[in-house]
Image (cartoon, rainbow, N blue to C red):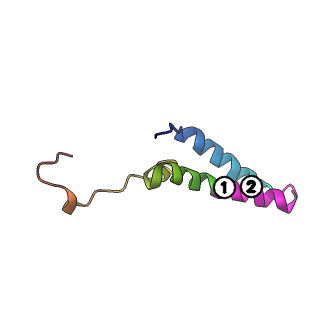
Amino acid sequence: MSVPVSMSRTRIKLAAFILLTAAAPVFDTPVWLTLALTLMCLAIPLAVAALGGADLVRELFLLPPRPIPLATIRKDDHI
């Protein structure tokens, strides 16, 4: 089963949680709120990994895809 995930929207939500987490101590928010925001920052990449694996997490963080080792490429495969 495949669930379509918009990486751009997920990136925006992750960035918003990161900014809120960074701003929480400045505005003297309760400790439980800062902890909840921090847990959400950790939960988003974990949820993306559970949904699509390492490749989707790389896409979330705008990392290039993992290169394919030359030893695994057959001569009849075309890249």
Q: Secondary structure at mark 2?
A: helix
| 12 with respect to 54 (left or right) | right
Q: Secondary structure at mark 1?
A: helix
> Residue beneath label 1, please?
41
Crowd tier of the residue under label 1, counting other residues whose Cα lies within 10 Å: few below 14, some 14–19, many 20 or above: many
Amino acid type, residue under disc 2 in the picture: Leu
Is mark 1 in CB contact (under 8 Å) with mark 2? yes
Please provide percent x and percent y for residue 69: 25, 61
Residue 38, quarter of the rendered image: bottom right
Q: Main secondary structure of the magenta part?
A: helix
Specify start and end residues of the magenta stretch as a single range: 26-42
Residue 23, quarter of the rendered image: bottom right
Please provide percent x and percent y for residue 55: 43, 52
Please say whether residue 32 is one of the residues in the magenta stretch.
yes
| 62 with respect to 68 (left or right) | right
Residue sitting nearer the eye, 10 or 24: 10
Image position of 71 with respect to 65: above or below: below
Image position of 30 with respect to 1: above or below: below
Q: CA distance from mark 1 to mark 2?
A: 6 Å
**Tag count in the figure?**
2
In the image, what residue occupies the spot 59% across and 38% down? Answer: 9
